[in-house]
Amino acid sequence: MTERIRQPALAPPPINPARPREDDPSAFLEAHYRHVWQTRMHDLPFVNGALAVESVGFQRLDGDWLGVVITPWFVNLLLVSGGGQLWGDIPAGERRYLSLPCGTMQFIADDDPDIGPYQYCPLIAPVDQLTDMATARLVAADAIRTVFATPPAAPETLAAQEPAEKVPVSRRGFFRRLAGKRN
């Protein structure tokens, strides 16, 4: 008789709750990613030496912080908890969809020991096609404008909102339409 070994059920990954940041996280994130650049990423073959670390356009949305971080290895849209409605604690590696002014976007949770939980939406990686910081800044600024912009209404929606040109209807025409007859 063979003995079955019971394996414990896999526990869900732990969730490290985010501590809301009251202040703009730009300088904090820049310092963190500069440290990563100098200590761990500097000599890797996929980095773009023409780029530096910079935060672009961080602003509050529904009480949380949303902005772009440029590094020599990625350009990402980052969501940082500010104690608002947009943030939701999920385990690192999990994905969630957020409804933003531009539409729905997918974010991936991460939990860095130095900066804590954050969520990101990859915009560009690798960044080898970006020739310089000016180009990277333009891409980041365009991403921020796009994320915070409300998309234009669909043509059907616009047509429904605009009153149709009113054609005068005779009394006889009104009753014929009411009876389901054409003119």
Image (cartoon, rainbow, N blue to C red):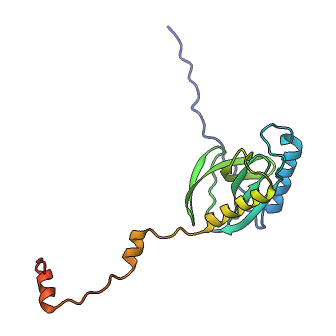
| Residue 31 occupies quadrant | bottom right
Q: Is residue 104 left or right of residue 125?
A: left
In the rendered image, residue 6, in percent from the top left (x then y), is placed at 56, 23
**Can the viewer see residue 78 in this picture?**
yes
* Farthest residue, direction top: 1
* Farthest residue, direction bottom: 171
> Which residue is at the front of the view, 23 or 121?
121
> Which residue is at the front of the view, 17 or 130?
130
Task: Say which residue appears at 59% left-offset and 48% top-offset.
Answer: 95
Relative height, residue 62 to residue 15 (above, below): below
Q: Is residue 22 left or right of residue 62?
A: right
| Residue 21 occupies quadrant | bottom right
In the rendered image, residue 55, in percent from the top left (x then y), is placed at 78, 60
**Can the viewer see residue 29 in this picture?**
no
Relative height, residue 164 to residue 130 (above, below): below
| Residue 58 occupies quadrant | bottom right
Callout count: 0
In the rendered image, residue 99, in percent from the top left (x then y), is placed at 55, 61
Task: Say which residue appears at 78% left-offset and 62% top-offset.
Answer: 25
Q: State which quarter of the image contains the C terminus.
A: bottom left
> Which residue is at the front of the view, 72 or 50?
50
Task: Say which residue appears at 78% left-offset and 67% top-offset.
Answer: 23
Relative height, residue 155 to residue 6 (above, below): below
In the rendered image, residue 111, in percent from the top left (x then y), is placed at 72, 47
> Which residue is at the front of the view, 148 or 110?
148
Task: Say which residue appears at 60% left-offset and 40% top-offset.
Answer: 12
Q: Is residue 38 left or right of residue 158?
A: right
Relative height, residue 3 to residue 147 (above, below): above
